[in-house]
Image (spheres, rainbow, N blue to C red):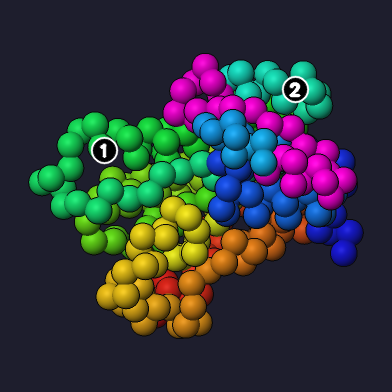
């Protein structure tokens, strides 16, 4: 079990205040990590931090907009001031697809998705991941999507952002292989979160998606934790440039 221990490691989770990000942060803490959660909503971060602290975890919060470089730099500076290092980064912050055909998608809507999902990952990797590269060790985990592997209807900006992040991971894994930093992705399928509640409540849509998922259910927050802990720590020491699909078999169907 020591291969999965994260004792004392400093792990930054973007979008860590709710949903998948909160579950990942909790899982990291349960395996011994000191956790930094960041996001745009202070109240959500505070509630999650209180829940984690109640279990004895060491947790820090920072209001951060990953699409804003100054905000990401401030996050990096704050983490280094508190802990002196960063051992793992989970780029989880993201926004959902805009369900429109491209003809009806405005440039502003395109940017609203790309700026958070792709540029946000770039900025966090550049600054927080760059700190690990300079130190000579670390792990980056980018949360992408099955939409980074196959097209989804009426989701051009989202698919572009997640496909771009998948290739960001592969290219960065090559660049940092000699610097002691591994870079991988987790590609979730359809998960039950507050961000997908509307889609799940639509019987026609949810039924169609369940029919395309061999395991016959949607993902739950806890389903992604093991993959994140594995990729963040020593158990995956020889794994880089990979995308681990946590999708109930969606992409195999």
Q: How far is mark 1 from mark 2, CA to CA?
A: 33 Å
Is residue 7 depicted above or below 247 in this figure? Answer: above
Task: Please tell me how crowded label 2 is: few (under 14), some (14-19), or many (20+) other residues with Cα within 10 Å.
Answer: some
* Residue 25 visible in the current orientation: yes
Relative to 151, does residue 13 appear above or below in the rendering?
above
Instruction: Find numbered disc 1 in the image and state the secondary structure of the residue it sits on.
Output: helix
The quadrant of the rendering that contains the C terminus is: bottom left
For marks 1 and 2, the one nearer the N-term is: 2
Check disc 2 and report its element: helix, strand or loop. helix
**Residue 59, position in %: x, y?**
77, 37
| Residue located at (75% from left, 22% from top) | 80
Quarter occupied by residue 221: bottom right
- Give, as a single range, the part of the protein colored magenta: 48-72
In the displayed structure, does residue 155 sit left or right of residue 24?
left
- Residue on which disc 1 sits: 110
Depth order, front residue of 244/44: 44
**Where is residue 16 shown, x and y percent of the image?**
61, 43
Q: Which residue sits at x=52%, y=32%?
A: 40
């Amino acid at each position: 079990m020591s291969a999965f221990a994260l004792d004392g490691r400093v792990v930054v989770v973007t979008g860590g205040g709710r949903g998948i990000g909160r579950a990942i942060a909790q899982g990291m803490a349960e395996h011994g990590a000191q956790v930094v959660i960041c996001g745009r909503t202070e109240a959500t971060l505070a509630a999650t931090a209180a829940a984690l602290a109640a279990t004895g975890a060491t947790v820090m919060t920072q209001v951060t907009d990953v699409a804003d470089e100054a905000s990401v730099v401030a996050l990096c500076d704050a983490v280094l001031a508190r802990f002196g290092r960063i051992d793992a980064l989970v780029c989880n912050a993201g926004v959902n697809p805009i369900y429109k055909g491209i003809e009806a998608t405005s440039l502003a809507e395109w940017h609203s998705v790309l700026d958070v999902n792709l540029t946000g990952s770039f900025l966090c990797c550049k600054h927080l991941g760059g700190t690990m590269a300079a130190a000579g060790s670390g792990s980056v985990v980018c949360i992408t999507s099955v939409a980074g592997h196959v097209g989804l209807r009426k989701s051009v900006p989202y698919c572009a952002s997640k496909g771009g992040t998948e290739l960001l991971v592969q290219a960065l894994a090559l660049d940092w292989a000699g610097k002691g930093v591994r870079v991988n992705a987790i590609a979730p399928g359809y998960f039950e979160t507050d961000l997908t509640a509307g889609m799940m409540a639509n019987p026609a849509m949810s039924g169609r998606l369940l029919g395309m998922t061999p395991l016959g259910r949607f993902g739950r927050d806890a389903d992604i934790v093991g993959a994140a802990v594995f990729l963040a720590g020593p158990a995956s020491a020889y794994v880089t440039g990979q995308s681990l699909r946590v999708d109930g078999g969606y992409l195999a169907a």
